[in-house]
Image (cartoon, grey):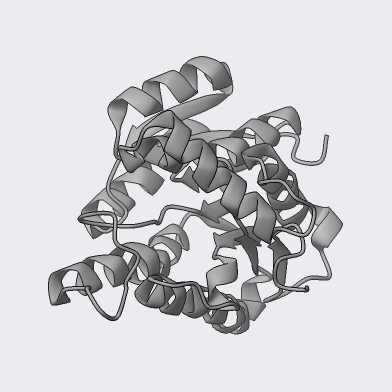
C-alpha cells in the first residue's frame, strides 16, 4: 500500500475527481479529510469512504475556512503528509469565462475559486505539512488547448500549473514536492447539473468522446490513480512537474 498511514487533505473531495482521488487514496492506505461546500454530498461520500476519512464543510475561497480545515485535520490525526488542491470549476450561471459574455463579477469569482484559492490553500497548509510532504494541484488541459467559452478558466489553470514550479522552488528547503494533475474530460456530476434532458446530455457526452483519441470520457478513479502516483514515493524524482491525463487530446 503506497500511502499506508499517510494523512491527506483533499479539497473538493466530496464529488467528481476529488472523490475519485479519495477512493484511490483509501485503497492505498491513506486517511484524512475531504473538504467541500455541500453537506449532502459530503455525507454521502463519507458513508462510502468509511471511518478512515472525515468530512469538513468549508469554502476554499474563505481563508478562515481554510485555517479551520487544517486545524481540524491536525487535531484529529496529529500530522499532514499529503495535500490535494482539487476544488474548482465554474461560477454564477456556470460560466467558464467567455470573453464575449463574462461579467467582472464572474471573472473575479472564477479567479478566486480556481487560482487565488489554490495559492492560499497551500499557504495555510504549510504550518501543518511535514517536511518531505507531497502537494498535488489539479489543473486542466484547458491550460494547454483552446476551448470556446473557457478563457478565464483556462488562464486560471495555466496559473495553477505555474504555481507548481514556483511553490516547488519556494519549498526546496523543506523537501516538499509540488506537482500537477491536468485532467481532460472526466465523467463527473457536472453533466447532471446542466439542467438538460438526459438525451441531450448523452449527445453532449458523445460529442466529447468523438474529440478524444481513445473515444471515451475518463473516470474519476483513473485520475485518482494518477494522484496516488504523484502523492507517493513512486514520484520522488518529480518536482514542479505536470501529468496530463486526457486520453490523448493534447497530443493529437
- Residue visible at 32% across and 62% down in the picture: 113
Instruction: Say which quarter of the image contains residue 52.
Output: top right
Instruction: Say which quarter of the image contains residue 161.
Output: bottom right
Residue 172, position in %: x, y? 65, 79
Left or right placement of residue 79 versus residue 224 in this view: left
Instruction: Say which quarter of the image contains residue 95.
Output: bottom left
Residue 251, position in %: x, y? 77, 73
- Residue visible at 36% across and 44% down in the picture: 69
Left or right placement of residue 30 versus residue 162 in this view: right
Left or right placement of residue 148 versus residue 84 in this view: left
Q: Is residue 201 above or below residue 114?
A: above
Q: Nearer the viewer, residue 5 or 142?
A: 142
Q: How many marks do you count on the picture? A: 0
Name the quarter where the N terminus is drawn. top right
Look at the image and tell me whether residue 79 can be seen: no
Q: Nearer the viewer, residue 232 or 145?
A: 145
Name the quarter where the C terminus is drawn. bottom right
- Residue visible at 61% across and 84% down in the picture: 169
- Residue visible at 26% across and 49% down in the picture: 65
Amino acid at each position: 500500500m503506497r500511502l499506508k498511514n499517510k494523512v491527506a487533505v483533499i479539497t473538493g473531495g466530496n464529488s467528481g475527481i476529488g472523490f475519485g482521488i479519495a477512493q484511490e487514496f483509501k485503497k492505498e492506505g491513506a486517511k484524512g479529510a475531504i473538504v467541500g461546500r455541500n453537506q449532502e454530498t459530503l455525507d454521502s461520500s463519507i458513508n462510502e469512504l468509511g471511518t478512515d476519512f472525515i468530512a469538513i464543510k468549508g469554502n476554499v475561497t474563505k481563508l478562515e475556512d481554510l485555517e479551520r480545515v487544517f486545524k481540524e485535520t491536525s487535531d484529529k490525526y496529529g500530522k499532514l503528509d499529503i495535500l490535494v488542491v482539487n476544488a474548482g470549476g465554474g461560477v454564477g450561471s456556470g460560466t467558464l469565462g467567455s470573453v464575449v459574455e463574462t461579467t467582472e463579477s464572474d471573472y473575479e469569482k472564477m479567479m478566486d475559486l480556481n487560482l487565488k484559492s489554490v495559492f492560499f490553500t497551500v499557504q495555510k497548509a504549510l504550518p501543518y505539512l511535514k517536511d518531505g510532504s507531497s502537494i498535488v494541484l489539479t489543473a486542466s488541459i484547458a491550460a494547454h488547448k483552446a476551448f470556446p467559452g473557457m478563457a478565464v478558466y483556462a488562464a486560471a489553470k495555466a496559473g495553477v500549473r505555474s504555481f507548481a514550479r514556483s511553490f516547488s522552488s519556494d519549498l526546496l528547503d523543506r523537501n516538499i514536492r509540488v506537482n500537477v494533475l491536468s485532467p481532460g474530460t472526466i465523467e463527473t456530476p457536472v453533466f447532471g447539473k446542466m439542467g438538460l434532458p438526459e438525451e441531450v446530455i448523452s449527445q453532449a457526452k458523445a460529442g466529447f468522446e468523438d474529440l478524444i483519441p481513445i473515444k471515451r470520457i475518463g473516470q474519476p478513479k483513473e485520475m485518482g490513480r494518477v494522484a496516488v502516483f504523484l502523492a507517493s514515493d513512486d514520484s520522488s524524482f518529480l518536482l514542479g512537474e505536470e501529468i496530463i491525463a486526457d486520453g490523448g487530446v493534447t497530443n493529437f
